[in-house]
Image: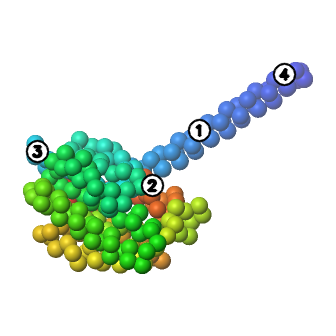
Amino acid sequence: MNINIIKEKIKLHKYCLIIIIIMLIVIIIMSISLLIKENTTFTNPYEVKVNPNDNFLFLGDSITDYYPLEEYYDNLPVVNSGIAGNKTTDILNNMKTRVYQYNPTKVFLLIGTNDLDMVSENIVNTTFDNIKKIVKEIRDNKSDATIYVESIYPVNSTLENNSVNNRTNKKIRTLNKKLSSYCDGEICNYINLFDDLTDEDGNLKEEYTEDGLHLNSLGYVVITRELLPYLNE
């Protein structure tokens, strides 16, 4: 056989092998992407009944601010009133623009983790008192609104480059216990999300966070599954 023909066949085989390898890589990448998407997206299983005057207000700090409500509550009248870095006092000092202007029918309040980052022996009680003031202000000014107080989410200080700082799960659990006792279904409704987000050591699960404090997409899927039924109450 002509040596040139042999060389051409070898060259052709090499090209075919390269093409096959590239196709396999593309298939693997697509499969991984689909798997990631499947684990971090959420399909709403509920048919939420909405009245024309409904407004579902999510009120809080960065954890609410970064919550992509439109993605998880598609076509529902949700309002994001979260501001990164907020403490309880920030909301108390700005109730009109943070709450009242939206005329909410339901309020999901998640606030306090930034307060607990402060170094003070009485910070848990101070934060608790401020949350009670927020609830009272809403009840006094928007008496028809149903108020849901979410538990403060756990943190994970074991991760590298975490943003936990002075927050501890001990302080968080103490505050959550006070909030649970305070909300009796008439004053407000307590939603325990702390337990849904913790690992066996009581820390925020690594798969739900990048920095030990804020939630990632999978973390938001977890809390959305828990919060959605309350929109139908």
Q: Earlier in the sequence, mark 2 or mark 4?
A: 4
Cα gap from disc 2 to disc 1, whole angstroms: 26 Å
Q: Earlier in the sequence, mark 3 or mark 1?
A: 1
Cα gap from disc 3 to disc 4, whole angstroms: 79 Å
Q: Which mark is residue 26?
A: 1
Q: Is residue 173 shown to the viewer in this render? A: no
Mark 3–mark 4 CB contact (< 8 Å): no
The amino acid marked with disc number 4 is Ile
Cα gap from disc 4 to disc 1, whole angstroms: 32 Å
**Kind of element beneath mark 1:** helix
Between label 4 and label 1, give the one nearer the viewer.
Answer: 1
Cα gap from disc 3 to disc 1, whole angstroms: 49 Å
| Residue at x 73%, y 29% (from the top left corner) | 15
The amino acid marked with disc number 3 is Asn
Q: Is residue 96 shown to the viewer in this render? A: yes
Residue annotated with mark 4: 5
* Image quarter of residue 148: bottom left
Residue annotated with mark 2: 216
Mark 2–mark 4 CB contact (< 8 Å): no
| Vertical side of 210 occupied by 155: above or below | below
Q: Earlier in the sequence, mark 3 or mark 4?
A: 4
